[in-house]
Image: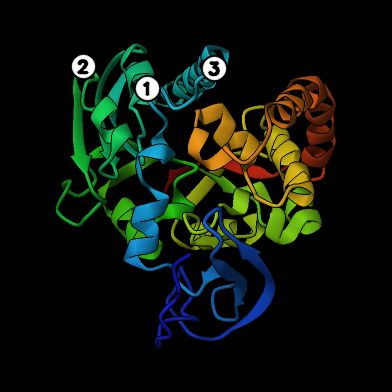
Amino acid sequence: MLTHKKNDSENACGYCKQRNSAVVYHTRDIFGDDYRINKCNICSAYFLAPQPSAQQLARAYDESYYGEGGEKFKDGLIEKMLDYFGMKRARMICGHLGNKGRILDIGCGNGKFLSFVKKQGDFEIYGIEKEGGSAKRAAKIPGIHLKTGMLERNDFAAESLDAVTLFQVFEHLAEPQQTIEIIIEILKRGGVLAISFPNIGSFQSCVFKGKWLHLDPPRHLFFFDPDDFKKKMSAFGFEMIREKYFSVEYNPFGMQQSLLNCILKKREVLYETLKGNKEYVKEFSKANLLFQNLFFKLSAPLFIISDAVESAFRKGATVEFVMKKK
């Protein structure tokens, strides 16, 4: 376990960097480090406090995070399902653009989404990914222009991109406000911004609190209630064209793993098992891991149905917005 160093920035909001907040609840990461979830009284964001150190983040994003070998998950069926969802997103984005354009995917992972975009027409594909296993895989995608690191000013000319995407990435960013400002600059008028992130106002978040899978400490640094986020983006000059809370890809598993987190002494055991992280799950018996795997497969239909109900009330565990720059 690493200890937090007390400093002035301990209670600084992960979004606006102000120090005026209240504690909502406590959580613990997979390494045994304790955090708080605070709500900022200035910008209304929820954020992780204290802010994780560089050492803690390096450990959280080590090779085990990216999975072993060429894929993140050991189960080929899971990878095929992820490819299916990635292709659906690519078709959705390209459907707003026609058959050509320049697309930037921030946090492009292994680059598969951009490879699916490339197949939809005459698209120039750009990706930004943190240095690590996923970036190494993304670099092998034909035609990709890849940058390792973070989006910075002068990476792209003003109003030079037709679309920017951030799928389950925004909450990882150390400088989210700056990133939004840069996106506004580099996106063309009429250009598309697609973004998805955990819904801190969801049913799962309210029930499981610090045990909720999608908190994912220390990687997820801040969270927005969808209504607050929409107001901010509207003020920046964006028009909402799609809003989606239902996600077979993310939400049912969020319920499954969060339930297990309430039962087991460690969090994310099933998730790490599916990635093949034997070191993390070595203290659990084969029978225990088998039970979790069966629970994962057999309960999936039930939690897909429950997600449909939650999402009808805009309480799904994740949210996806597609908007246009005016």
Q: Position of residue 24 (x, y in %)?
A: 69, 73
Give the CA separation, mark 2 to mark 3.
Answer: 25 Å
Give the CA separation, mark 1 to mark 3.
Answer: 17 Å
Q: Position of residue 69 (x, y in %)?
A: 35, 22
Q: Which residue is mark 1?
A: 112
The residue depicted at 77 percent of the width and 39 percent of the height is: 311
| Mark 1 residue element | helix
Amino acid at circle 2? Pro
In the image, 315: left or right of 52? Answer: right
Q: How is the image coloured?
A: rainbow
Q: Which mark is residue 142?
A: 2
Q: Position of residue 287 (x, y in %)?
A: 74, 26
Q: Position of residue 175 (x, y in %)?
A: 35, 63
Q: Which mark is residue 232?
A: none
Amino acid at circle 3? Asp
Amino acid at circle 1? Lys
- Which of discs 1 and 3 lies nearer the camera? The answer is 3
Q: Is residue 123 above or below residue 223?
A: above
